[in-house]
Amino acid sequence: MKKRNFKIAIISGIVMSFMTMTGCKNSFLYTNNPNETTGNTFWTSEADVDAAMASVYSPMRVPLYSYWGAFTGFQDINGLGDDVLTIPAEEPTTWQIVTFINDPNNGDASSTYQRMYECIYRANLVIVNTPKVPNMSQADKTSYIAEAKFMRGLAYFVLVSNYGDVPLRTEPAVTNAQKYIPSTPAAQIWLQVEQDFKDAASGLPVDRTGDQYGRATSGAALAYLGKAYLFQKKYDSCEATLVHLTTAPYHYSLLPDYEDNFTSANKTNNPEAVFQWVYGPYGSQYSPWSEEAKNAGMYNYIPQLVGTIQGGGWFKYVPSNYIIDQFFQELRPAGSSTVFDKRMYTDFFWKRSNFGEKDTTWYGNSTFDQIWNSCLGKISRFYPTYNFDTTTHGKFLIRKFTNAWEGIPNADNYWGPTPSTANYIIMRYAEVLMNLAEAEIRDGNLQPALNNINLIRVRAGLPAKSMTDFPNADALMAELQHQDLLEFFFEQKRWDDLKRWYNPTQLQQLFVAHEKQGAANFSAKYYEFPIPASEIQTNPAIKQNPLWQ
């Protein structure tokens, strides 16, 4: 399979449109609108298919606006959990979502919905047109189609798990009859997700290397197929699927150092990265807002959103009282190299000397006091309405996903000299292990589940547990939930876990107990986003989801 540098193809420009083959064939600078391409100008070579495939990825991995985008989805989905507090008086659309006062007009939820269907439309074009392309081997065609199905399955996974019933389109929507269709019940969407991931797993390679690193693999398809089963409580199927990823031909493993998942280390050879958005020094670092335009920056902009003022960030989140309290539940054994769980040192800034450890500095010799004082203006917005507790355990700020690891001034500022090129891993092998362990517990296979949980514990510097520590499955499940909270802090996972583990009444009670912002507003309908008002207005066949009617 002859491919150009796919990473640069996605990152350098134009994935909003497809490449024409009448100009420079190694560039995306000359493009056709994907909605207007015809057989006369496109789908005539493998290079066309490769360019089209690059465009499928783009709506998912644009760095600011999408489900994983730093400015919208990353903020919204993290803010829905009980492990962070959102700084008040920032983006209104984010505030609406995280405090449960959003409605069908919310721009962030509408944008994510639109992005997923852009991906689906482009994937459908690849699936339908690739078989017609001349001078391609059947094996290459099968691989491209499998890749498109993985991306379509991922888009529908995001849609069904966040919006419930949505329109199901498995071919390019061209006519009004194809465009304007009613929602399909969620159960049927899940079946399509399962089938797409199965097809992808059977047609994709086990590994991607070199310029292809970051593209979908059969392992990524199996990981998301298992996750889809878990979300539907199909525990037997989840367990049977995910166990494959623990043996050959797959060779995933946990990185020895947890922090390396959130830095530029191992950008092209991370054995824990099952699927990730690959970022790099492509396009202009100063123009992330133009997204799919020709010279849009394709750096990782999360540090700008979450970094502290001292580090040049916009400082939009702090750790919740609850997450800090949970980390204090189990300190490391006496004589260990650190007082706390190793993950804490990646996740948070704090004054180490308050707990008998040597103080450290960040951002070119900035002390914790300097970092804290730089953020006081925004921290003051919590009071008196919200309790950001700085007395019970002390003062903590979020370090995870910042560029503090670089140790240089202004590291979180994307206008600075070193904007982040760290990849954003959206499926870690750690999650595969924990999803597998959850399914094993539900199936009554407690010892294998504990073995997987212990892999997570030991890397964090905590001692392995034995079955004598857990009198029953409920006790082991509580340990899994605790470790899941600590392992995946601020990784857009907590909200999905909470929805899966608790019914609406239980979840509201938990939110109140954990001092979640907007807890009093929460009700069952917020398990899903509403179908966007713009979709209701333009699609006469669709109705609002039942929870929002």
Image (spheres, helix red, strand yellow):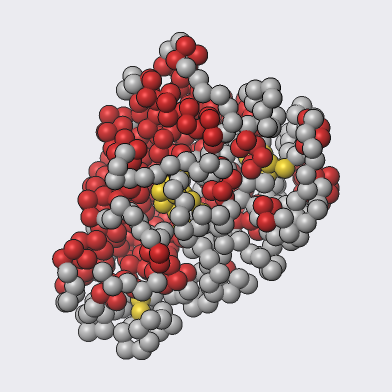
Relative to 173, 304 lies left or right: right
- Of 175 and 170, the residue lying toward us: 170
Residue lying at 78% horizontally and 30% vertically, measured from the top left: 355
| Image spot of residue 5 (x, y percent) | 40, 72
| Image spot of residue 269 (x, y percent) | 45, 55
**For residue 16, above or below residue 167:** below
The quarter of the image holding the C terminus is top left
- Of 297 and 179, the residue lying toward us: 297
The quarter of the image holding the N terminus is bottom left
Residue lying at 81% horizontally and 35% vertically, measured from the top left: 353
**For residue 64, above or below residue 395:** below
Q: Residue 547: name its quadrant.
A: top left
Residue lying at 35% horizontally and 79% vertically, measured from the top left: 19
| Image spot of residue 77 (x, y percent) | 53, 46
Residue lying at 47% horizontally and 34% vertically, measured from the top left: 497
- Of 356 and 548, the residue lying toward us: 356
Relative to 396, 72 lies left or right: left
Q: Residue 409: name its quadrant.
A: bottom right
Looking at the image, which residue sits at the far bottom? Answer: 23
Q: Is residue 204 visible?
A: yes
